[in-house]
């Protein structure tokens, strides 16, 4: 149920992606532009009576050969 809600959010919000966790099929990774955006989503979920369990945020970075 929460998976469908997150997928719906990702469809409407181009700055957010939802993907299954590579380590555990029951967990869902939410990729967003920042902590504030994720915080707003979590508060919306709580108001809709979902109770998400959260792990600390991780910073994803990417290096390009051309720019270093």
Image: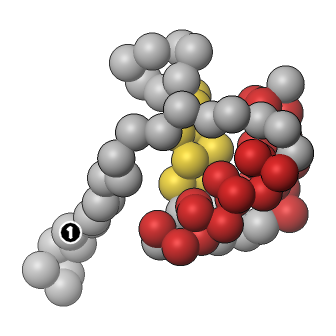
Work out whether residue 7 can be spotted: no
Q: To which quarter of the image does residue 43 belong? A: bottom right
| Colouring rule applied to residues | secondary structure
Left or right: residue 18 versus residue 14 is: left
Whether residue 13 is situated above or below residue 60 in the rendered picture: below
Of 15 and 43, the residue lying toward us: 43
Q: Name the residue under label 1.
A: 63
Left or right: residue 59 versus residue 24 is: left
Whether residue 51 is situated above or below residue 36 in the rendered picture: above
Q: To which quarter of the image does residue 40 belong? A: bottom right
* Residue pictured at 87% horizontal, 45% vertical: 48
Q: Position of residue 9 (x, y in %)?
A: 81, 54
Please give the count of numbered marks on the rendered protein. Answer: 1
* Residue pictured at 19% horizontal, 81% vertical: 66
> Farthest residue in the top direction?
25
User: Which quadrant does the C terminus fall into?
Assistant: bottom left
Q: Where is residue 49 in the image (x, y as percent from the top left)?
A: 84, 38
Left or right: residue 12 versus residue 42 is: right
Q: Position of residue 15 (x, y in %)?
A: 64, 70
Left or right: residue 64 versus residue 54 is: left
> Farthest residue in the left direction?
68
Q: To which quarter of the image does residue 28 belong? A: top right
Q: Where is residue 36 in the image (x, y as percent from the top left)?
A: 53, 73
Question: Label 1: how many residues lie within 10 Å, few (<14), some (14-19) or many (20+)?
Answer: few
Whether residue 24 is situated above or below residue 34 in the rendered picture: above
> Farthest residue in the bottom direction?
67
* Residue pictured at 57% horizontal, 15% vertical: 26
User: Which quadrant does the N terminus fall into?
Assistant: top right
């Amino acid at each position: 149920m929460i998976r469908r809600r997150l997928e719906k959010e990702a469809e409407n919000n181009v700055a957010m992606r939802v993907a299954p966790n590579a380590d555990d099929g029951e967990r869902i990774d939410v990729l967003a532009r920042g902590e504030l955006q994720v915080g707003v989503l979590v508060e919306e979920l709580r108001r809709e009576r979902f109770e998400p369990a959260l792990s600390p945020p991780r910073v994803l970075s990417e290096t390009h050969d051309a720019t270093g």
